Image: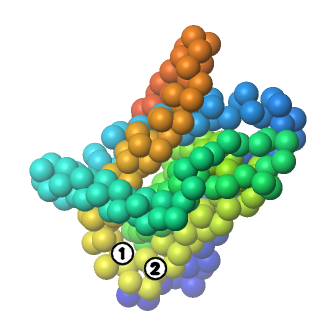
Amino acid sequence: MTLPANLPAAIIAASLLVSLCSFSGLFVLWIPPERLQRLIPYLVALAVGVLLGDAFIHLIPDAVARQGSISTVCLMVLLGVVIFFVLEKMVRWRHDHDFDFDFTHPEKNALRPMAKMNLIGDAIHNFVDGILIAGSFLVDPVIGTTTTFAIIAHEIPQEIGDVGALIHGGFAPKKAVLYNFYGSLSVVLGAVFTLILSQIAESSLVFLLPIAAGGFIYIATTDMMPALHEHSTLRHLFGQTTILAAGIGFMQAIVVFEQLLLP
């Protein structure tokens, strides 16, 4: 199939635009360390809500629509959980579990496994987004444009939460923003992969979507939720629960937005 001359450039530009959403958390660089320390648990709660909402409201239903078999998709989600369990075992190998984050001297902190796992999960998810963007542009540039805006809408709160999770996981704020951006560049890789092998890329979504969902469920429940229990005052209970629910609610709102935006 011969593509219009400007279509590959439009696809790459759209994927780069989505990658730039990773800078949504840039505001943490201007927050004093003491205030940032109080804010981080709430950003982690936002990340939990968005990851779970994305998995159960977007990725799994999309995988079911493509696969047609709920049981097969559930098995693939479980496979994703197992894959990320094995990945974390590898990440934790030789890892020192004693951890106390120093916001005053962040360069002295060791990295928690949750930070590395978050980067892996986010990179896979962004790769899937790149396939979705390129695939929709190949169908119709108008659909590609609306799909890009729909992805941007759910990427912004996720990237804010991811930066908070990376800081809680041991990254200094500047490095958290920078590494989050590096992970977001897999959107471009997914788009290029689709341009080169469009049929294979489209078919791979049947497997990548539920595996990414399983990864998000694993990271949110085993890495991030236990971190939230480190702050167990009544104020944290209500604040974190509210923000976690808001993250899920935002993902649900995106469904309505996508139905209005996409043909």
Label 1 neighbour load within 10 Å: few <14, some 14-19, many 20+: many
Helix, strand or loop status at disc 1: helix
Which residue is identified by label 1?
201
Question: Which residue lies at the image location 84% right of the left edge and 48% below the top edge?
Answer: 105
Q: Residue at x 54, y 36 (%)?
A: 227
Front residue (pair 232, 9): 232
Q: How many marks?
A: 2
Q: Amino acid at mark 2?
A: Phe
Residue 252, how many percent across, how many down? 42, 32
Q: What kind of residue is marked 1?
A: Ala
In the displayed structure, 199 sits above or below 97; it is below
Question: Taking 176 as reference, is 233 left or right?
Answer: left
Q: Nearer the viewer, residue 126 or 192?
A: 126
Q: Is residue 5 above or below residue 10?
A: below
For image coordinates 18% across by 55% down, the residue present is 75
Out of 102 and 169, give the one closest to the viewer.
102
User: Distance of mark 2 from mark 1, alpha carbons?
Assistant: 7 Å
Using residue 125 as the reference point, say whether residue 231 is left or right of it.
right
Query: Residue 217 at x, y = what percent?
Result: 37, 45
Residue 37 visible here: yes
Query: Disc 2 marks which residue?
Result: 193
Q: Earlier in the sequence, mark 2 or mark 1?
A: 2
Circles 2 and 1: CB atoms closer than 8 Å? yes
Q: Is residue 257 above or below residue 123?
A: above
Which quadrant would the N terminus be assigned to in this image?
Answer: bottom left
Report whether residue 259 is seen. no
Q: Quadrant of residue 90?
A: bottom left
Percent across and percent down for residue 11 are: 56, 71
Left or right of 87: which side holds 233? Answer: right
**At numbered mark 2, what does the secondary structure look like: helix, strand or loop?**
helix
* Crowd rating for badge 2 (residues with CA inside 10 Å; few <14, some 14–19, many 20+): some
Residue found at x 80% / y 55%? 107
